[in-house]
Amino acid sequence: MDSAALEPSLYTVKAVFILDNDGNRLLSKYYDPELYPSMKEQKNFEMNVFNKTHKADNEISFLEGMTIVYKSSIDLFFYVAGSAQENELMLMAVLNCLFESLSQMLRKNVEKRTLLDNMDGVFLVVDEIIDGGVILESDPQQVIEKVNYRADDNPLSEQSVAQVLQSAKEQIKWSILK
């Protein structure tokens, strides 16, 4: 085995991607440009990973010389890939941080529709956890604080009621003034 391949490196993560329950890409970031240089190669890799993992109960897979950790939630599959020699626990820490950060950001509603509606925040979360393949943060609370991403403080139903009441008050006020 190549001794350079066994050298410790800060560049732990090779790729992060989120797929829907059909294997379609929702988000992907590749940190090693030589690994899968074209979009077609990336999508083929993602489809191979999805086909191998979407029905499995495991959390770790080895495919195409990569260590892949993954987790599913409702209609989403989260993947973090590293080299074959990478420590699975490090990759799992990244995966758990990503999932828990998104869970907090999306108010425990981690599903495709909500994820797509908040994609800007999702990219911010990924960028706070990983930069160029280097793990920056593994504490979801710290990630959320750094991102400072705030979904509306009130749920939509409560906000709508508040808006309706405010609008009704204004209409009554205007009708009295006339």
Image (spheres, helix red, strand yellow):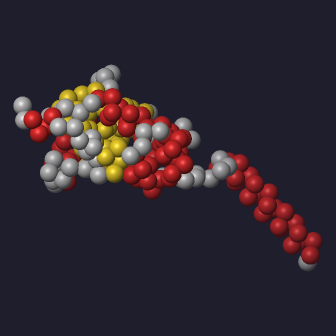
Q: Is residue 77 above or below residue 57?
A: below
How many marks the image carries: the answer is 0
The quarter of the image holding the C terminus is: bottom right
Q: Position of residue 27 (x, y in %)?
A: 34, 49
Seen from the viewer's position, the closer of residues 127 and 2 is: 2
Q: Position of residue 128 (x, y in %)?
A: 42, 50
Q: Is residue 166 above or below residue 69?
A: below
Seen from the viewer's position, the closer of residues 157 and 13 is: 13
The quarter of the image holding the N terminus is: top left
Seen from the viewer's position, the closer of residues 161 and 46 is: 46
Residue 55 seen: no
Q: Position of residue 103 (x, y in %)?
A: 50, 39
7 relative to 104 in the view: left or right: left
162 relative to 56 in the view: left or right: right
- Outermost residue toward the left? 1
Seen from the viewer's position, the closer of residues 12 and 147 is: 12
Residue at the (87%, 66%) spot, across then down: 172
Residue 1 seen: yes
Residue at the (28%, 47%) spot, across then down: 133
Q: Is residue 67 above or below residue 156?
A: above
66 relative to 174 in the view: left or right: left
Q: Position of residue 146 (x, y in %)?
A: 51, 51
